[in-house]
Image (cartoon, helix red, strand yellow):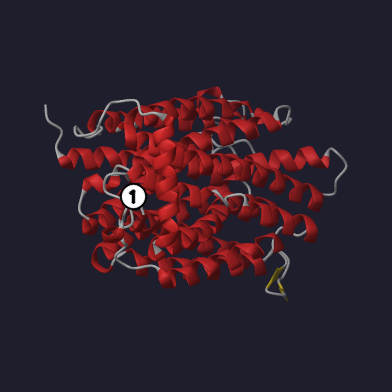
Amino acid sequence: MAITQKKRIWGWMTFDWATQPFYTLGLTFIFGPYFAAIAAQYYLGTGLDEAAADAQAQSIWGIGQSIAGLLIAFSAPVLGAFADTSGRKMPWIAFFSVIYVVAAAMLWGLTPDAANLFLMLFIFYVGFFAAESALNFVNAILPSLGTDDEVGRISGSGAAFGYWGGVVSLFIMLLLFAEDETGVTFLGIAPLFGLDPEMREGTRFVGPFIAIWFALFMIPFFLWVRDTPTEKDATPAMGKVLSDLWATMKSVYKRKSLFNFLVGSMVYRDALNALYAFGGVYAALVLDWQTMQLGVFGIIAAIAAAVTTWIGGICDQRYGPKPVIRVCVWVLIIVSTIIVGMSRESFFGVPLAAGSGLPDMVFYVCGAAIGGAGGALYAASRSMMVRHAHPQRPTEAFGLFALTGKATAFLAPALITLFTLVSGNTQIGFVPVVFLFLIGLILLRWVNKDGDRAEWSVSA
């Protein structure tokens, strides 16, 4: 039975739905803050004071993200070029999916005594590497799903669908599994399946939950998405792959619009990823939020992301991706500035009364802004890359997109780590994020709103 284009689009969008819990539950709102709390307790046990322990916990999380980002950066273009030359994307997606599921399931092993803290950090970022690597191949399918005008809406709808997956998965975790400091879930019950709150088994179940969710919801993807019939099945020589890739990379410098977009998106995506990775950690360390507060924060951010990303996709189809990107970056600059200026005790130097709820309310608004602007920015950037991609080599193009997005992925986490360690202040650690967003915004001035596909030349 033939697979219709509509089914193919829906199948493609289920990847976002299937993988979003790794970012929503794993990176930002459940596992990340839990890891930070366990790591902070571990460093307190080594004799550090509370501020130094918090800073050290944030630092090792950033180091893990930096290393994973570098590995993704330098593998993505080569894997992409190989996939385009061979014409096979689906086997790579299946390969990384298996790694993703195994790594996610193993996160159950982060026990409250921090006995295997660094092993779990390694395993988490193995899963992160697999998710991001699979995403590069999935993104490369996007150009074949519609015209340049249509892919903006498709990209936005797919990302929005994914964020709704994040909302649903977060609700399930908070209502039925993740326990608070009293040992009960948001419903006031013990975690399901007899999971032991004392051993934080409800929260630790986030790993197996992510793995099960992915395995279940990737079924439509593998049923309805195929490598296109015109693609070759031959195994290319690595020398030819690297030669073609090198020619492509040399041509990028001559393409003003693509060059500025890749560099500009490199820095603003790096800053955004840092907000995602450190947002929950910041709330746990600076605002002393517990699991339930982080969960509500996550729900607000995910709903805002789903709605705003869908709207952004419509705006992308009507006005193009560039205006959407600009507005989103401005919103994120404002939010990052607020994060730097706010703590539990003061707001931009103005002392707050003990127990003031203002920091909590402001950060909830920040969460909605990060989720909404970040989601729309991701979808619009993906759409803009389509306008710069060679029609015959989309995976290679998105490999370069990943390279520039991850080659400096160490930069924001490293700068946050450096500023945090030097200042001894978690808030000050976020100062570099503001400047990275500003640099990205400036470079957008030289990006053609319609891309530069017509100027492409592989041999240029």
Task: Determine whether 30 is above or below 445 in the image.
Answer: above
Of 164 and 132, nearer the camera is: 132
Can you say which quadrant of the picture contains the C terminus? Answer: bottom left
Left of 207 or right of it: where is 316?
left
- Residue 446 place in picture, x, y as percent: 42, 71
* Residue 346, image x, y percentages: 71, 70
The residue type indicated by label 1 comes to Val
The answer, for residue 84, to whether it is visible in the render is: yes
Pick the residue in front: 171 or 49. 49
- Looking at the picture, does residue 145 appear above or below residue 218? below
> Picture coordinates of residue 84 (x, y %)?
33, 37
Residue 375 vs residue 4, the one in the foreground = 4
Q: Secondary structure at mark 1?
A: loop
Figure check: 3 above or below 51: above
Q: Residue at x 46, y 40 (%)?
A: 76
The residue at the point 77 percent across, 55 percent down is 421
Whether residue 134 is visible to the viewer of this picture, yes or no, is no
Residue 443 position, x and y percent, is 48, 69
Q: Where is 222 relative to 382, above or below?
A: above
* The quadrant where residue 305 appears: bottom left
The part of the image, by quadrant, that contains residue 387 is bottom left
Extreme residue in the left direction: 1
Residue at screen point 75% across, 43% down: 40
Dot 1 crowding, Cα within 10 Å, few <14, some 14–19, many 20+ = some
Image quarter in which the N terminus is found: top left
- Residue at the spot of label 1: 458
Quarter occupied by residue 381: bottom left
